[in-house]
Amino acid sequence: MEGGSLPRETVYRATRLIRFCYGHRLLGYAGKCRFPHGHNGLVEVTVGRSRLDRLGMVMDFEEIKSKIQGWVDEALDHKMLLNEKDPLVAVLRKMGDPVVTMKGNPTAENIARIILGQARRRKLPVLCVRLWETPNSCAEVG
């Protein structure tokens, strides 16, 4: 469709993948996830615009990486993500383990929401953030 016109509502998207490892558990949950365990998470940060820049891009993948991957690496990678009410927080901090707390359970949905907020604070035109907790399960916010 070279040279053809696109529908007015066209949105161009670009997605950067970010991998990180984390531990968590879910308070009040009846299943196995009530116990501390870990994941090799995969985050998809999708940005979008109605027009491409002068180089024909939504945004350079390296710019997406520089604006959000550093934060993920620093704030979430190899950390235990816990509900701020979890009694395990005090125990792990006393041991010197890296703990990140949040309001509510550290579900894939809530972790994706936090990453979305950080990406928007960094002025990325984010359409959505998807967190793959396992190769078969993901949550998306946007």
Image (cartoon, rainbow, N blue to C red):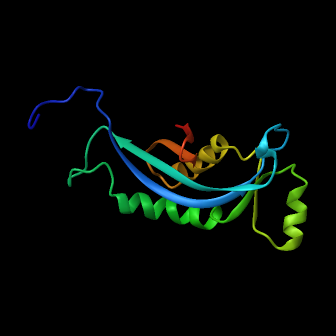
| Residue at the outermost left position | 3
Residue 61 makes an appearance in the image: yes
Closest to the observer, 16 or 12:
16
Q: Is residue 68 above or below residue 58?
A: below
The picture places residue 122, in percent across and down from the top left corner, at 51, 55
Residue 59 point in image, percent of width and height: 33, 53
In which quadrant of the rendered view does residue 104 lie?
top right
Residue under the image location 64 percent in, 48 percent down: 111
Q: In this view, does 55 lie above or below 26?
A: below
Query: Is 38 on the left or on the right of 131, as rendered?
Result: right
Q: Exactly how many numbered labels are in the figure?
A: 0
Q: Is residue 3 left or right of residue 56?
A: left
Q: Which residue lies furthest to the bottom in this view?
A: 96
- In the rendered image, the vertical position of residue 113 relative to residue 121, given as above or below: above
Q: In this view, does 64 lie to the left or right of 98?
A: left
Residue 37, given in percent of the width and then of the height, sits at: 74, 55
Q: Position of residue 29 (x, y in %)?
A: 81, 38
Give the quadrant of the N terminus.
top left
Given residues 55 and 31, the one toward you in this image is: 31
Is residue 104 visible in the rendered structure shown here? no
Horizontally, residue 139 falls left or right of residue 57, namely right
From this view, report whether residue 126 is shown above or below residue 38. Answer: above
